[in-house]
Image (spheres, rainbow, N blue to C red):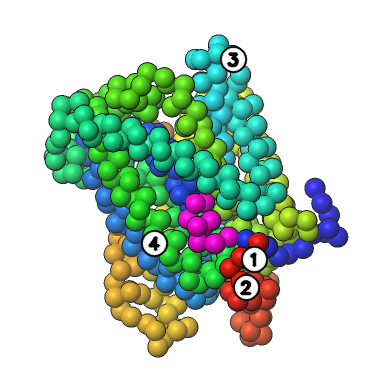
């Protein structure tokens, strides 16, 4: 760990172009992970109506992406939703949005390491008869991801681009093979209707949690704004474009997965822990080890991307004093938030090691940390949708438009309420019924932290507003000037 004398409080501006932030967003969304790890869980709740779940999730996320784009046209900072909602609704709500995003990305990063370790452990046991507990492999993934993240965001971008290319090629081959062969028993419209869902709307609402989880990453472009060239032009393009393109891939891909098993055999999909292996062996090749290596690639890539997102949110909160300022320090050599990354590594140990000692497997650990994390992020999405109108009305009234800043965002919030309400009515099966309480506990801790900060937190924001200095959304002066840098600057 470096000391303050060798650190700064600035990220490196101009490190990424629109391609870079799209790559990191798409890697975090993880098409292979979503289509072959999340679809069985979705099928368990929604039956054959898996594509319908992805359509509804895409609509809600695309409407929310529109909101993020509206904010990003005026605000460009590492804090993303923290900066957005703080400027729209004040210090306290802004802090709670930042705290929730902080927890969501931390949970997603830890969950990514857990499921990566579990899958690699299973792979070694099946193909090489090597028995290594998942926890050691998960911590090894954490170490690799942290090393790449500390060296620099450009390294993460380049590694992510290679990983994304491999992942998309593999997904395309499997999906096209299924569609060309007509699946198990031919094409059907049932997956796009409520008739495909045994429990109707209730099952679809519950399944939407994992539908929205599949889109997590579309918003990471906003957290990389301070390191992006011309962020107020490129971030909105990346947010909407990436959501739309990957969303269409999910709809087509999930339809292929569904008919690959057959709409009358959906229980096989719901109970299959290795859907990618099954479909590849049935429609492409029996060389399952190749499939497994591709999935490892996708898992590590997604963990790398979300870890970078967490570090930027933590950096922004620390820089502004919302949490200890130590989080807001960066490496003088690499200009990356090394302290925040160190905390991510420490928290991975704190959360995963006790679960391992308790005898829990990596997939259970993934569920316990990832589900509360996505619920936190959905709440943040709803808050952003409901405050963007106020932001434009009070800060940029000449540009305020009812359709863009009220109607579309409110529709997005309503769609996002579907998976939230499904957590309480009807009561989901155990342990899903307990996981929302972890989300609530995190928010209660945030309220305690906010109350303890008291007037210091509000005073910091008031001082920024009065002085006109850049806030957590705008970034430091050097970043603001980055929009004028030549496109080729590294």
Callouts 1 and 2 close, C-beta under 8 Å: yes
Residue lying at the far front in this picture: please name it: 488
For residue 179, what is the image quadrant?
top left
Image quadrant for the C terminus? Answer: bottom right
Cα distance in 3D space between marks 3 and 2 = 52 Å
Does dot 1 land on a helix, a strand or a loop? loop
Name the residue carrying label 1. Answer: 489
Image coords of residue 217 (percent x, y)? 47, 52
Position of 355 compared to 267: left or right?
right
The structure residue drawn at horizontal position 34% and vertical position 67%, both measured from the top left corner, is 409
Name the residue carrying label 3. Answer: 131
Name the N-terminal-most of marks 3 and 1: 3
Name the residue carrying label 4. Answer: 240
Name the one closer to the observer, 26 or 453.
26
Task: Tell which tag, 3 or 2, sits nearer the viewer.
Answer: 2
- Residues drawn in magenta: 16-24
Image coords of residue 213 (percent x, y)? 41, 46
Neighbourhood count class around disc 3 (C-alpha, 10 Å): few under 14, some 14–19, many 20 upward: few
Image coords of residue 433 (percent x, y)? 39, 39
Name the residue carrying label 2. Answer: 485
Cα distance in 3D space between marks 4 and 1 = 25 Å
Neighbourhood count class around disc 4 (C-alpha, 10 Å): few under 14, some 14–19, many 20 upward: many
Task: Tell which tag, 4 or 2, sits nearer the viewer.
Answer: 2
Cα distance in 3D space between marks 1 and 2 = 7 Å
């Amino acid at each position: 760990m470096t000391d303050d004398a060798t650190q700064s409080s600035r990220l490196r501006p101009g490190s990424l172009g629109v391609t870079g932030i799209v790559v990191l967003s798409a890697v975090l969304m993880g098409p292979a992970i979503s289509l072959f790890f999340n679809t069985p869980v979705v099928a368990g709740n929604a039956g054959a109506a898996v594509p319908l779940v992805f359509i509804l999730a895409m609509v809600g996320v695309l409407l929310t992406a529109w909101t993020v784009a509206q904010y990003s046209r005026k605000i460009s900072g590492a804090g993303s939703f923290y900066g957005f909602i703080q400027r729209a609704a004040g210090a306290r709500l802004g802090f709670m949005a930042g705290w929730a995003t902080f927890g969501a990305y931390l949970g997603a990063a830890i969950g990514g390491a857990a499921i990566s370790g579990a899958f690699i452990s299973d792979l070694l046991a099946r193909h090489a008869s090597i028995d290594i507990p998942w926890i050691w492999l998960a911590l090894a993934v954490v170490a690799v991801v942290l090393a790449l993240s500390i060296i620099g965001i450009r390294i993460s971008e380049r590694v992510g681009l290679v990983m994304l290319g491999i992942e998309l090629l593999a997904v395309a081959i499997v999906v096209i093979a299924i569609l060309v062969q007509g699946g198990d028993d031919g094409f059907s419209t049932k997956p796009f209707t409520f008739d495909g869902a045994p429990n109707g709307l209730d099952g679809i609402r519950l399944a939407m949690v994992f539908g929205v989880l599949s889109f997590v990453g579309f918003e990471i472009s906003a957290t990389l704004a301070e390191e992006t060239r011309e962020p107020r032009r490129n971030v909105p393009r990346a947010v909407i474009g990436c959501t739309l393109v990957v969303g269409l891939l999910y709809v087509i891909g999930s339809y292929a997965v569904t008919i690959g098993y057959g709409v009358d055999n959906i229980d096989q999909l719901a109970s299959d822990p290795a859907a990618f292996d099954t479909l590849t062996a049935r429609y492409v090749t029996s060389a399952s080890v190749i499939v497994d290596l591709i999935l490892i690639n996708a898992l590590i890539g997604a963990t790398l991307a979300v870890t970078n997102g967490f570090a930027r949110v933590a950096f922004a909160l620390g820089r502004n004093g919302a949490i200890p300022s130590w989080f807001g320090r960066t490496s003088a050599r690499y200009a990356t938030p090394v302290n925040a990354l160190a905390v991510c590594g420490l928290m991975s140990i704190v959360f995963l090691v006790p679960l391992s000692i308790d005898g829990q497997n990596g997939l259970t650990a993934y569920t316990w940390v990832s589900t509360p994390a996505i619920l936190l992020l959905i709440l943040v999405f709803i808050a952003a949708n409901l405050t963007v109108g106020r932001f434009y009305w009070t800060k940029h009234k000449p540009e305020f438009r009812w359709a863009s800043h009220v109607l579309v965002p409110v529709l997005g919030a309503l769609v996002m309420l579907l998976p939230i309400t499904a957590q309480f009515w009807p009561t989901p099966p155990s342990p899903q019924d307990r996981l929302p309480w972890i989300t609530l506990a995190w928010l209660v801790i945030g309220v305690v932290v906010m109350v303890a900060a008291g007037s210091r937190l509000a005073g910091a924001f008031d001082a920024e507003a009065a002085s006109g200095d850049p806030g957590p959304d705008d970034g430091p002066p050097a970043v603001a000037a980055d929009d004028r840098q030549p496109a080729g600057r590294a």
